[in-house]
Image (cartoon, helix red, strand yellow):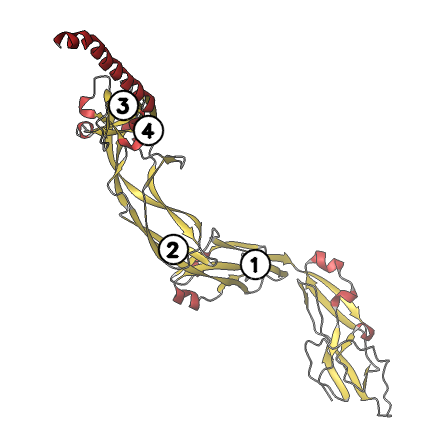
Amino acid sequence: MKNKLASNLALKILSVVVAFLFWLVIINITDPTTARTFNDIPVEIVNENVITSANQVYEIMDGDKVNVTVKGKRSFVERLRAEDFVATADMSGLSKVNAVSIEVELQGVDSDMDYEIDWGNAMLKVKLEKRVTQKFKVQVEHKGELSENYVLGEMVAKPNIVEVSCGESKFKKIDHVGVMVSLNGESEDFETEYSPILYDEDGDVLDAVNVTFSNDTIKVSTKVLSTKEVPVEVRTVGTPAEGYSLVQTDFRPEKIRVSGTDEALEKAQPIQITINIDGAKKDIEKELPIINYLSENLWIVGDVGTISVRCEIEKTGERSFTLMPSDITVKNLPADYAMTFAADAPRYSVNLAGKESKLSELSLTDLGAYVDLAGYGAGSHLMEVKFTLPKGITMKNTVHVRVILQDRGDNSTDNTTASPLPTGNNSQQTQGSEG
């Protein structure tokens, strides 16, 4: 029996070895060993207080992300995610060349399988520099638009001063600290929190990496004001020197948009400006600050700050015309009436004053002479002739004519001249009658 067992021992051992090898082959066929790489695993900084306590800041130059390769059974490797890896750089181990080894671990994964992690002995490299701390006034800026006919009022930041800490090189680029208020068609006061922003001298935004603020948010209270358009009125007092006249008065702007409290806007009156031209022999030009004419609690909207006024004064020219009754237009002749000028109607002298260049261009028809018969009845009437004169031309005398109105059914005769043709009913002024 013993010999029988001994004679089969080698065969049995061989069977076991073959079976084990066969098992390994089966296992590797069904769950082979494989490798998988996970790219850009973020590196977490630990113990950074080692640097900050030395009044320094750091800037990562290389190694803020790492690539990790895992080798193990396929069933294990394929269920891994990038979030399962934790990469850290311990600043307490920073070398003299400002580098520290990166360590990578798998966390939250339960497995009794063997695996290997390789990240190529990656290093985190940093640049150190002195930390600078300084306080800045918060400047409030805005973008966007309010509702139509509304303007921004006061914008108050709380706190209005913040402390900024950062590296010396970045600190040298800082011009100011601001917050950007976004406007989206608001029509009433509002309050919102914003993050502080660093700006350089060109108004460009600086990144806030390794920058700390004493306040992470700034609350801004924004006033929204109604607006109103008020007219500008300019009048003159006094008369120019003898032999001179006021040709025209020009001013700009003719309207001003203002903002203010609801009560002040409701009470807002036209801006009234008085210019003294007494004794003037030349043009009068003035730039008048609008603010001097605004009531309390009103403010100018826009960039216009002054009202420009120009009173054109010229030496007076004179010219005379001879006016015949036939040159006079009749307006508003009553129905069923005939009108004639008195038989002894003379020629009339019309004396004008104004700018010589305008006077020289005038013709008799430009004077627009007319009488208005609206409201008159039968009889003889002494009437003032009215004139429609060009701008800047004035009358130096008055002209009266006698007209006779007669009912067309009255057969009585009168020693009269031929009646001029009547015009349409576009009357303006009437003159008292003499019966």
Dot placed on the residue nearer the N-terminal end, 2 or 4: 4
Question: Residue at position x 27%, y 23% from top?
Answer: 126
Question: Which mark is in front, 3 or 1?
Answer: 3
Give me the C-alpha separation between circle 3 and circle 1. Answer: 79 Å
Compared across the picture, whether 17 is left or right of 416 comes to: left
Q: Secondary structure at mark 3?
A: strand
Dot placed on the residue nearer the N-terminal end, 4 or 1: 4
Label 2: few (<14), some (14–19) or many (≥20) C-alpha neighbours in 10 Å = some
Amino acid at the residue labelled 3? Val
Q: Secondary structure at mark 4?
A: loop
Amino acid at the residue labelled 1? Ala
Up-down relation of residue 343 to residue 308 (above or below): below
Q: Secondary structure at mark 2?
A: strand
Amino acid at the residue labelled 4? Glu
**Given the current orientation, which residue lies at the most extreme left position?**
2
Give me the C-alpha separation between circle 4 and circle 1. Answer: 99 Å
- Circles 3 and 1: CB atoms closer than 8 Å: no
Query: Which of the 4 image quarters holds residue 11?
Result: top left
Give me the C-alpha separation between circle 2 and circle 4. Answer: 61 Å
Instruction: Indicate the position of residue 366 as horizontal and vertical percent values.
Output: 75, 65
Question: Residue at position x 34%, y 26% from top?
Answer: 39
Up-down relation of residue 21 to residue 88 (above or below): above
In this orientation, does residue 169 appear? no
Up-down relation of residue 262 to residue 215 (above or below): below
Dot placed on the residue nearer the N-terminal end, 1 or 2: 2
Amino acid at the residue labelled 2? Gly
Dot placed on the residue nearer the N-terminal end, 3 or 1: 3
Q: Which mark is residue 78?
A: 4
Mark 2, residue position: 153
Give me the C-alpha separation between circle 1 and circle 2. Answer: 43 Å
Mark 3, residue position: 126
Question: Which mark is in front, 4 or 1?
Answer: 4
